[in-house]
Amino acid sequence: MALRVAFAGLKHDHVRTILRLALDDPGVELAGVADSDLTNREAIAQAFRVPVDYISHEALLESAEFDALVVCDAFGRRGEAAIAALETGKHVFSDKPLCTREVELHRIADLAREKGLEVGVDFSLRHYWAGAKLPLEQGEIGDLLSCTFAGPHALGLGRRPSWYFEPGMHGGIINDLMGHGLDYVGWVTGQRCVEVLSATRVTGLLREHPGFEMLGEAHFRLADGLTAFGHVDYLAPEGHAGGWWLAFTGSEGDALLSEASGLRLRRTGAAETHIAAAELRSASPHPFVDFVGLLTDGTPPLRTTAEALDCSLASLVAQRLAASGEGRGPVDGTEVSGK
């Protein structure tokens, strides 16, 4: 029996990738598509030749029969859509970020646990760099001590949807972007974030929208003492590639990962090892494919619900601490992941 999937929100271009994956999968049945904006509805209906008959997740939940909801609304509205779906017994897959408020995250975690439902989030670096996990885990650079990662992005001001700049809709740059790096670090180390050591954000750089956050940085402590420092921005020069990179420092060497050059391992007393980026890719092409496989045939995903929620919580806590100016505080994920 096919997995019946509905889509709530067409507000970010990431939805096009997920919708195409759903339409191309014979194990998935499209059960409904909703968006509040007529222009979005017409664009998707024309591009994908699918009916877009609903204007909200509430209308979907009231009228359509389905098993899982894909959420790709404006960031500030995602939490309420995910919660409503879980309350009615639907699994949830969300573009990142999953939500913009810690209270929403805790409610999502409670519902998923109580009802035995899955929550997937579209963090992608595990899929890009899956092949780097084993050598890092097996001590190719010794014991892992610290990690630094960065995700520079071009803002593309004229191409960004207007809701990005509406009060309460974006939710902050750390929560928007930093989850990718945090998710990968947590996967490689097997450790979740337990404390934000510092967190800052920068506004005032965009004349048209002075309150919009253009840069965010946060320093995290993981459960085993390893630290991770993340930098994200919307300052990559237009016309040039941005792209993620990540550097691990170990007791016997270091490693650099990037979207352009793949993995470079340098061990004390040994020649540098290089693995091209294409060779690091996971056999699973996308987190949504994992989500479908888990629900249809029980295939273990690269990322569990607990891991997606842990990473989302750490990003939200860092965002709150950056916005408040407190800078430092605990990440209590025990009620989120049960660990």
Image (cartoon, rainbow, N blue to C red):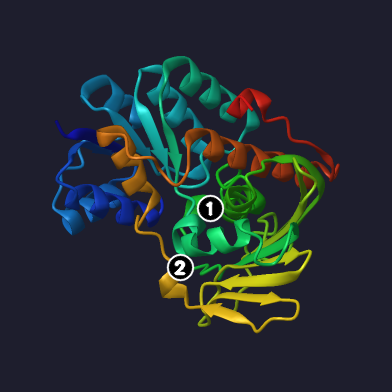
Task: State the SS at label 2.
Answer: helix
Q: Residues within 10 Å of mark 2 (few under 14, many from 20)?
A: some
Among the two numbered marks 2 and 1 on one chain, the one whose residue lies closer to the N terminus? 1
Whole-percent x and y of residue 154?
55, 71
- Quarter of the image where the C terminus is located: top right
Residue at image coords 75%, 66%: 249
Q: Which mark is residue 164?
A: 1
**Towards the viewer: 226 or 243:** 226
Whole-percent x and y of residue 156?
51, 69
Tell me, yes or no, if residue 8 can be seen here. no
- Quarter of the image where the N terminus is located: top left
- Determine which residue is flagged by label 2: 280
Judged left or right of residue 126, residue 186 is right
The residue under label 1 is which amino acid type? Tyr
Residue at image coords 53%, 53%: 164
Q: How far apart are marks 2 and 1 (CA)?
A: 33 Å
Number of numbered discs on residues: 2
The residue under label 2 is which amino acid type? Leu
Quarter holding residue 133 = bottom right
Q: In this view, does 187 lie above or below 297?
A: below
Q: Residue 134 carries which label?
A: none
Quarter holding residue 256 = bottom right
Judged left or right of residue 118, residue 175 is right
Residue at image coords 44%, 47%: 302
Tell me, yes or no, if residue 109 can be seen here. yes
